[in-house]
Image: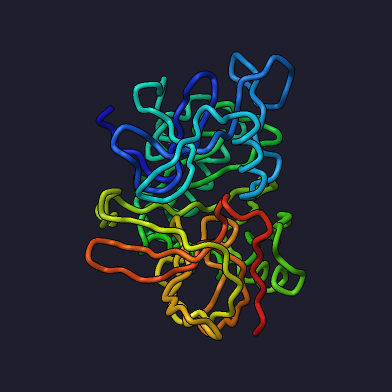
Amino acid sequence: MSVLLRDKDFIKCNDIFFQVVGYLHPRDYVIAIPRYVKVDYATIWRNGSYYDRVLKEYSSSDLRKALSERFSKYLDYDTNLDSVLPLIAKKEIDKIFLSSRGFDQLSRNDSLAKRTHEILDLLSSNTNIPRNDFGLTGTLLIEIYNTIYSDIDIVIYGRNNVEKVKNFLKERKEFLIKDSSTIKGLDIKSYNIISKRKWNKCKYKGRYFSINPVLKFDEIKISYDDIKIKNFGIIEVKVEIVEKIDPYFYPIRYKVKAYETKYEIKELAIFENYYFDAFEEGDIIEIKAILQKYKEKDDEYFRLAYGVREIGDQYIRILA
């Protein structure tokens, strides 16, 4: 398989739709999580056959349970990342769905497809972003969507384009909605603060849509072989957000200053999309996460990894 896959692309294998996770994958495998599986009963998702969601709620703990109970054949230990991951062998992939081709391949001429193109026109015309810098993910991309119930998951490529869309949506507040997701490990105070900051969940003419940032190919600066991770165990620590390194793209990354610990922790990496652009510089947070020694080319430092499957009772709390 010579096609380069990115975060938010989909692959199909053994009647299961997997969503590609991140940008760094072992040579002969793709790191991807199961999202929809073929079933023998009626659901709202269909295209010739019926499909059902693998996860009712998208959290690291729910994903860990689903993978271990139903998809253990895809789990394997990765030495570079020091983690058991869902690894899909490239030779077993039946079909690839590139988010960049989502709009071009949206073949059904129905109300949801028309509304999707209308939202694309709205975003493109008001931000001067070319249409080919937008894509689709989710059920619209794999064409098992339901015209009544399905949301529209729009992909935006590139940092500058994400900033333009963010500015437009925050200026036009009538499109923004409060995210009603149920998030484990988040207290009410922190949830309310983050909810007010979120801008990627929207509604247009009665239809919900989301913004999903993805790096352009020329923005992907490292490869799988450039990194090496060693897990040091669970840590509870207080940190200050010093700088937004990559608040939009998977994994979400912040430069931090840690307090009351012997480790010189330089970074927080978050592997749950809910925390997309959730923190601001100056935030003081308390966190239970995994301490990692992270090596990227010649640079090596300690970082915190949150939203990983290795820890079930992790939490983040905004203190100030």
Name of the residue lying farthest toward the left: 298
The residue that appears at 29% across and 62% down in the rendered structure is 296
Q: Residue at x 35, y 39 (%)?
A: 5
| Rendering coords of residue 167 (x, y %) | 49, 69
Residue 164 located left or right of residue 67? left
Residue located at (63% from left, 29% from top)? 70
Residue 19 visible from this viewpoint: yes
Give the position of the N terminus as an image quadrant: top left
Residue closest to the eye, 314 or 316: 314
- At a point 59% along the width and 19% down the height, the residue shown is 47
Q: Nearer the viewer, residue 284 or 106?
A: 284
Pick whichever, 264 or 200, lies toward us: 264
Name above or below for residue 104 compared with residue 83: above
Question: x%, y% of residue 133?
Answer: 36, 49
Residue 246 appears in which quarter of the rendering? bottom left
Classify 54 as above or below 189. above
